[in-house]
Image (tube, rainbow, N blue to C red):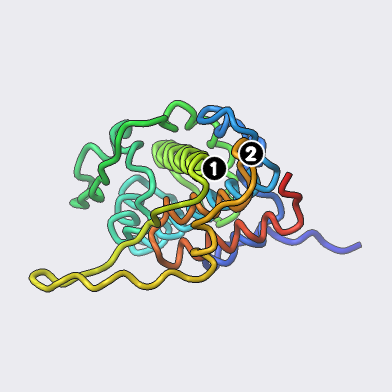
Amino acid sequence: MTAKPGRPKRRGPETASVMDVPPFKPSLARAVFRDVTPMHVSGSAARAAAAVTRTVLTEIIDAARRAAAEEARTRLIPRDLLSALGRNIELDVGDEWYAHSPTFNRLDGGVVPPPKRSRPPKQSGVVGAHRFEAGVKKLLRSQGATAVPTMVRDLDGIASVFMTRLARDAAMVVREGGIKRFGTVVLATPGEPAPPPPPLEDSLVALSTRTGDRRTIGGNDILSATTIQLFDGDIRQRALAEAREATQNVSAG
């Protein structure tokens, strides 16, 4: 009889793609989408949204683990989250949560919270954050990590806010028949003109025009929403790859 494999340990961003059971189930994605829009959500869209959220949270946890390792700790604390977000602007995906968390309302260990991106008030994911607790804990275990309750609550909130925004933007893509903007960040030297943004990949250009009915959110609509929510960088590329993989063998209906 073959022995059962040991608990998988986090070795890098690629680990998220080989998890046996997704921490965030399609049923959870559907529940979040119902809070935002009356549109039908296809199976491929629910799986894609769950995969993108998993990828983003995996990256945040991995960055926090690296911050904790610098202090020879394995248990994650809020200071590690602040360090992770402060070091990589790509991870700043849940600023609606910041106002509800003590972590972001003080200077913790001399770490300055990441800058808040201004957005008009819309449907918030804060009220549904508790629904993500089981998935966050499973994701932590899959990476061989533990976290104090406050840290788990922050990860819950960030996951909920991010998926809520994903749902909101996917619904907008359906209504508008495509996307007109992409999440992009360009680094510039003070006092010098900002360089032009890099040209869009053909796969992203293809998402700018949508085909299909205006009543159903499909897998490609989640890809479009992902390009809006995430800056152009490694995390966005991994999230898009994970979403495509999650929907590869799922009917768009």
Is 10 placed left or right of 109 in the picture?
A: right
Residue 207 - label: none
Q: Are marks 1 and 2 in contact (CB under 8 Å)?
A: yes
Q: Residue at (87%, 64%) from the top-left corner?
A: 2
Task: Report x, y in % for residue 68.
Answer: 37, 57
Furthest toward the left, the residue is 191
Q: Residue at (52%, 47%) from the top-left corner?
A: 177
Name which residue type carries label 1: Val
Above or below: residue 90 compared with residue 201: above
Q: Which residue is mark 1?
A: 174
Quadrant that contains the C terminus: top right
Q: Which residue is mark 2?
A: 216
Q: Residue at (33%, 54%) from the top-left corner?
A: 85
Identify which residue, 41 or 236, lies in the foreground: 41
Q: Is residue 140 visible?
A: no
Q: Secondary structure at mark 2?
A: strand
Name which residue type carries label 2: Thr
Mark earlier in primary sequence (1, 2): 1
